[in-house]
Image (cartoon, rainbow, N blue to C red):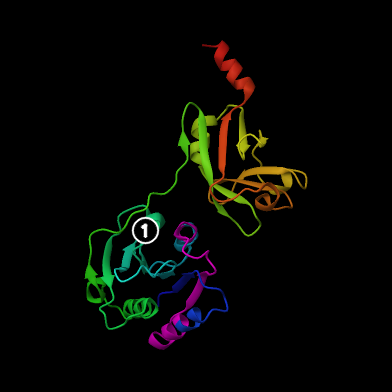
Amino acid sequence: MPVITLTTEWRPDDFYSGILKGRLCSLCPDTQVIDNAFNIPAFNITHASFVIRNTYMNYPAGSIHIICVHTDGGSDARYLLLRANDHYFIGADNGIFNLILNQQPDEMVEIGDGEVSDEIGIFADAASFLVKGKSLREIGTPVTAVSEKVPLRATIEKEVITGSVIFIDSYGNAITNVTRDIFNRVFSGKKYRILIQSNSYSTDRISARYSDEPVGELVTRFNMLDLLEVAINGGSISELLGVETGSVVRVELAAEEKILKHHTK
């Protein structure tokens, strides 16, 4: 029996959650329904896609992921059911699928035939049909493309990596789009500086743990997602330094490396 996960922009006490869970329990009573994440910032598909992209593969193959974030797109809204990487995704065609998968799905159909007018009902019905063993073509109408939004990636130019904060976690730590692989390709064996908030704050070391630095000091580390994270040991870098989603983080050669390179040319 597959698992159904919910990622929503609803508060824990909102009635929408109860309606969706109630319908799922009625339509497929033996299926486990799990809150993957709730209270996603309203309409923020970038935030939601980051959460889903980094969590869905931890669920069993065949899991069904319902996404209720920015689903009301007006009269021309399109709702889709996708299959990719042995998982199923249900949500609005608002660009979020491309941000989650960054690849062409294996199969996708448009769902909702007009008999059910609200997206909660459409999503619950589609999930229940999957649980009952129906194929995607039995559930919806095949489509060949989804709306696309281009993910924000770190850039490399003249031995400078320019990245940005893409997520603030529960502790106020700032996660960037600078991957361990990109960092190592540019700065392996070289001395570097990591600059946060332009040149206001900087560090020249990457730690393995937050506790490697004194309490209250700046910490940079690669987290479990292999993404560069900037933080303050024992504090919130978001609150203390005003770091937020979109803040720029740069990695450049340290001054002595620049001098050495200049003299060896």
Tag 1 residue: 95
Q: Nearer the viewer, residue 157 or 118?
A: 118
Whole-percent x, y for residue 190 in the image: 58, 26
Residue sitting farthest toward the bottom: 26
Quadrant of the rendered structure where residue 131 is? bottom left
Whole-percent x, y for residue 15 in the image: 51, 82
Whole-percent x, y for residue 144 in the image: 23, 60
Residue 250 seen in the current view = yes
Q: Is residue 252 magenta?
A: no
Question: In the picture shown, does residue 197 fall above or below 121?
Answer: above
Q: Nearer the viewer, residue 134 or 126?
A: 126
* Residue at position x 48%, y 37% in the image: 182
Q: Nearer the viewer, residue 121 or 214?
A: 121
Does dot 1 land on a helix, a strand or a loop? loop
Q: Position of 86 compared to 205: left or right? A: left
Q: In this figure, what is the number of numbered marks?
A: 1
Amino acid at pointer 1: Gly
Q: Position of 60 compared to 134: left or right? A: right
Residue 30 seen in the current view = no
Q: Residues within 10 Å of mark 1 (few under 14, many from 20)?
A: some
Whole-percent x, y for residue 258 in the image: 58, 20
Q: Nearer the viewer, residue 63 or 254?
A: 254
- In the image, the segment drawn in magenta is 20-49
Question: In the picture shown, does residue 146 fall above or below 186?
Answer: below
Name the image quarter holding the N terminus: bottom left
